Image (cartoon, rainbow, N blue to C red):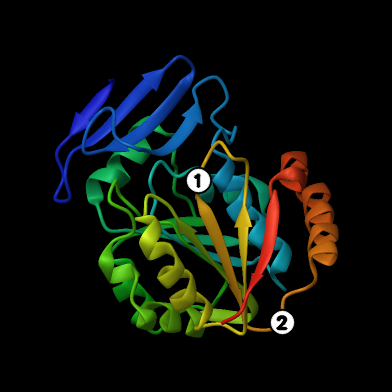
Amino acid sequence: MVHEADSPFGPVYVVDVGDQRSLRFDSPEGTLQSAILKSDPLAVPISYVRVATAGLALTQGRSRILVVGLGGGSFPMLLHRLLPRRSRIDVVEINPVVVDTARRFFGVREDHRLLIHVDEGSRFMTRQGARYDLILLDAFSDRGTPDHLKAARVFEDVRHRLSFGGVAVLNIALEDPRDVAKRIETFASAFEDCAMLRGTAQYSNLILVGTLEPLPSEPLFRQRLWRLARELDFPELAESVVSFKRVSG
């Protein structure tokens, strides 16, 4: 353990195991929230981050991104590296201690393209403001997604903050299996179309994508994903999605 800090939402830990540095909540043995490789901070050791990035294959544009839940900053820092310089990434994180920890131990740096807002995600969503090409809901603890980000009205607010052709991405992790079906139904009902994406079996995260127009077929999605991987010079992205399954809303 290299760092421990109390926060309004419980203790926060930074743990090194070999070359991997991870962020954990509640205890040093708590569920891994985010990870980097110290030898290569730009590496993406957690597969679900790559699966979430695959949502970009379904967007019309990539100029404005919103991430709810910072963790160690793996997803926003990856997008900061991959996307064109004209793109902008907003991150909403409710816990100021997590923000400080991400800056000090995970290489998260803000600039004119990457801004961090200390706020509650559902409250941020209700405000008048920019529309986004991709919105990722990635806030969770050892007990799963916070209750205020599970309500149907939150997904309606997300829908209204999407730009034309935009996509919403939801990371479901650490949930009671009995609750997952309801989470999928609630999310899917807010969008025109929805699909479940899964990565390698190493991680149990389920990624949902919701769109404002019909999704492409799986073969067309995979063609788009290959093109995106070449465009972003991120070859690992092409093989990131193991399964693609449509969901009826």
Question: Residue 226: image x %, image y %?
Answer: 83, 52
Q: Left or right of 37: which side holds 214?
A: right
Image point (61%, 85%), residue name: 192
Secondary element under disc 2, as helix, strand or loop, is: loop
Determine the CA span between mark 2 and mark 1: 26 Å
Question: Residue 243: image x %, image y %?
Answer: 69, 54
Residue nearer the viewer, 205 or 68:
205
Secondary element under disc 1, as helix, strand or loop, is: loop
Q: Which label number is shown at residue 49?
A: none
Amino acid type at image mark 2: Pro
Q: Which label number is shown at residue 214?
A: 2
> Is the N terminus in the top left, top right, bottom left or bottom right quadrant?
top left
Residue nearer the viewer, 43 or 182:
182
Looking at the image, is mark 2 or mark 1 nearer the viewer?
A: 1
Q: Left or right of 237: which side holds 98?
A: left
Image point (73%, 39%), residue name: 236
Whether pointer 2 and pointer 1 mark residues with C-beta atoms closer than 8 Å, the reply is no
In the rendered image, the residue lying farthest to the front is 178
> Is the C terminus in the top left, top right, bottom left or bottom right quadrant?
bottom right
Residue 169 vertical placement versus 35 (above, below): below
Pointer 2 local density, CA inside 10 Å: few below 14, some 14–19, many at least 20: few
Pointer 1 local density, CA inside 10 Å: few below 14, some 14–19, many at least 20: some
Q: Left or right of 26: which side holds 108?
A: right
Q: Which corner quadrant of the image does residue 207 belong to?
A: bottom right
Question: Residue 202: image x %, image y %?
Answer: 55, 36
Q: Is residue 127 visible?
A: no
Image point (47%, 23%), residue name: 20
Residue 25 vertical placement versus 87 (above, below): above
Who comes first in sequence, dot 2 or dot 1? 1
Amino acid type at image mark 1: Ser
**Residue identified by numbered label 1:** 204
Question: Residue 234: image x %, image y %?
Answer: 74, 42
